[in-house]
Image (cartoon, rainbow, N blue to C red):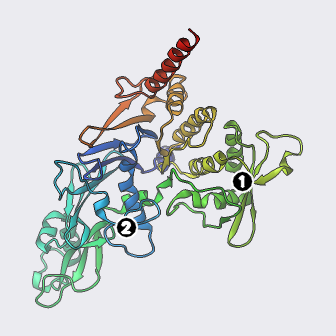
Amino acid sequence: MDTASGSRRKSQSRERGITGISISGYKSLVEGRSIEIRPLTILAGANSSGKSSAMQPLLLLKQTLEVSYDPGYLLLDGPNVRFTSADQFLPKLPGSPSLTPFVIAVQIDGIETLTLTFRKQAKKGIELIEMKHDMGKRVTTLRPEMPHAEIIAAVPDAVNFQQSIEGVGQAAENSIFKDFRWSVDRNRCFLSVGLHPSAKGDSGPSSGALVNLVNPAGPFESNIRKLIHVPGLRGNPERTYRATAVGADFPGTFENYVASVISHWQTTKDDRLGQLGSTLEALGLTWKVETRQVDDTQVELRVGRLKHSARGGARDMVSIADVGFGLSQTLPVLVALLTALPGQMVYLEQPEIHLHPRAQSALARVLVDAAKRGVRIVAETHSSLLVMSVQSLIAEGYIAPDRVKLHWFRRRDDGITEVASADLDKAGAYGDWPEDFADVTLEVESRYLDAAERSLG
């Protein structure tokens, strides 16, 4: 193999992606909590323990970036997360300061981190007060209304750019930049550095940027926009679904795109349509899915009435509205996993919802297959069968243990969320776990056996 072409292929296959999230000052996540993101990341814990809260800040950024108008620093009421006031997610716990900042840090490839610090301002709502970009050897900190001199000190690129244009030794009074100033600009929930013309006798910018030089949020914005969100509430099965565009990004929540994605696969004869049918059959739901274009605005989803292929089964198709609820709830999960590219994050809320226990166990293989393909999956689950099935696949050698990460959430007596994280060994075991799903199962079984023994005695 040619060395250059081999290196190029390796570089192309290494997709940039989100590898970690840190949250503080958000709901019960008052103290800083970090969530490492592996190809398969499982969030577990009791109800209201903080699992959803760990992902909601990332969804706030996603919906802020995707909306067709500029909503300010954060879009609070959107398709992914819904608030009417920042007070609804800022901490209100005993002992937590009323002005506690809300901080979210996003890490890419384990080496590059962007930290955003928000604060509720009196009569102004929530505002971004600082953005810090950490590249390991170099940290750049930006703040709104940062003076020109501080920007020059904090951002060497501004000086280098200016000198390269002016020429070495050129007098400052002859500089083409003498009537311009560097300033910090807001791009929705991010900050960047731009070169602006100054009003005479004023040190501040008076119009749009001539040059947008420093935009450290670029790769972060791209990854956040590409996040696929499959919510826990995925809607009722419909007779027809609204036609949508099919691309690399899916603004809002993913269930709105499922019918059109399947229609696209059917039209282009994409192999993923066959994979979808095989996976649904393995889960015991159906063996075939197809679409029918009703008109330019509506798509009908039809599924095989039987669970397995049979003679004449290709003609035995019914509307998805006429079969079990579990199929319509599982379809967005499967289509999202097949759609996602290596490095792309898919956030699944309760992927096992409305599934029979056997199907929940089989779903683990589907998640693992996508993780092995390079998709970064974050699955929030209450299913002990799903977790134990992932452990079994590790023990069987089907996936390496370092590709999986478990995070357990629990609320302390004071209401603050704690997160315990565990690595699995080659046997699929995870060591000391704060609380195990199996403990609940054993407790219920023991209670039943004791009661049965007493009633028969």
Q: Is residue 60 above or below residue 177?
A: above
- Residue 112: x and y in percent read 30, 51
Residue, x 38% and y 44% (percent of image)? Answer: 48
Residue, x 37% and y 75% (percent of image)? Answer: 70
Q: Is residue 161 above or below residue 57?
A: below
The amino acid type of the residue labelled 1 equals Ile
Q: Nearer the viewer, residue 27 or 345?
A: 27
Q: Quadrant of the N terminus?
A: top right
The amino acid type of the residue labelled 2 equals Leu
Marks 1,2: beta carbons within 8 A: no
State the mark number for residue 320: 1
- Residue 151: x and y in percent read 16, 69
Q: Earlier in the sequence, mark 1 or mark 2?
A: 2
Residue, x 49% and y 54% (percent of image)? Answer: 229
Q: SS at mark 1?
A: helix
In this picture, residue 414 sits left or right of residue 436: left
In this picture, residue 123 sits left or right of residue 360: left
In this picture, residue 440 sits left or right of residue 137: right
State the mark number for residue 170: none
In this picture, residue 18 sits left or right of residue 117: right
- Residue 395: x and y in percent read 51, 22
Q: Residues within 10 Å of mark 1 (few under 14, many from 20)?
A: many
Q: SS at mark 2?
A: loop
Q: Nearer the viewer, residue 112 or 231?
A: 231
Q: Quadrant of the C terminus?
A: top right
State the mark number for residue 75: 2
Farthest residue in the top direction? 457
Eye-nearest disc, 1 or 2:
1
